[in-house]
């Protein structure tokens, strides 16, 4: 599981039938203090996230498919949570 910031969306009128009705988000993986790494992934949104939200993404195929409830779908990454706050020993990232 990774912490990431939603930096964009993807619109695709032609896509795999498993993706019909799904929102596709571009997520930039970040450090716990919110610094973006430049490592972007496309993830299916399951929680209603939007641009500039900090989210939790699962980037393992089987876990992503389970989160979507679609065991045979070609899914690599899924947004499974919207982050309100990250506390570490040295800092706090509040993103409300």
Image: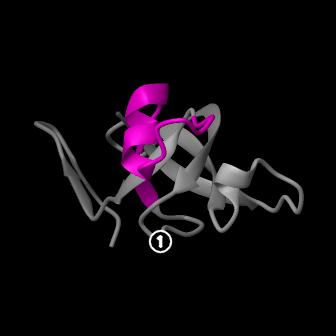
Magenta segment includes 77: no
Q: Position of residue 24 (x, y in %)?
A: 66, 56
* Label 1 environment density (alpha carbons within 10 Å; few <14, some 14–19, many ≥20): few
Which portion, as a residue range, is magenta? 54-75
x 67%, y 54%: residue: 19
The quarter of the rendered structure image containing the N terminus is top left
Q: Nearer the viewer, residue 65 or 49?
A: 65
Of 92 and 11, nearer the camera is 11
| Foreground pick, 57 / 92 | 57
Farthest residue, direction left: 89
Residue 39 in the image: above or below residue 51: above
Nearer-the-camera pick, 70 or 3: 70
Which quadrant of the rendered structure holds the C terminus? bottom left
Q: Position of residue 12 (x, y in %)?
A: 84, 58
Color style of the picture: one colour
Residue 28 in sight in this render: yes
Left or right: residue 96 compared with residue 90:
right
Q: Residue visible at 45% across and 61% down?
A: 46
The local secondary structure at tag 1 comes to: loop
Q: Using residue 24 as the reference point, say whether residue 61 is left or right of it.
A: left
Q: How many labels does the image show?
A: 1
Image location (x, y in percent) of residue 79: 45, 51
Note whether residue 60 is visible: no
Q: In this view, does 13 lie to the left or right of 38?
A: right
**Quick check: 39 above or below 94?**
above
Residue at image position (58%, 37%) is 75
**Residue 19 higher or lower than 74, as above or below:** below
Residue 67 lies, in percent from the top left, at 38, 47
Q: What residue would you read off at disc 1?
A: 48
Q: In which quarter of the image is residue 21?
A: bottom right
């Amino acid at each position: 599981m990774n912490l990431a910031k939603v930096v964009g969306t993807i619109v695709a009128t032609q896509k795999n039938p498993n993706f019909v009705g799904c929102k596709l988000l571009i997520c930039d993986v970040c450090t716990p203090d919110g610094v973006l790494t430049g490592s972007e992934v496309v993830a299916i949104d399951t929680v209603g996230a939007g641009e500039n939200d900090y989210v939790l993404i699962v980037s393992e195929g089987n876990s992503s498919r389970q989160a979507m409830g679609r065991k045979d779908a070609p899914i690599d990454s899924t947004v499974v949570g919207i982050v309100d706050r990250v506390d570490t020993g040295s800092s706090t990232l509040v993103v409300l």
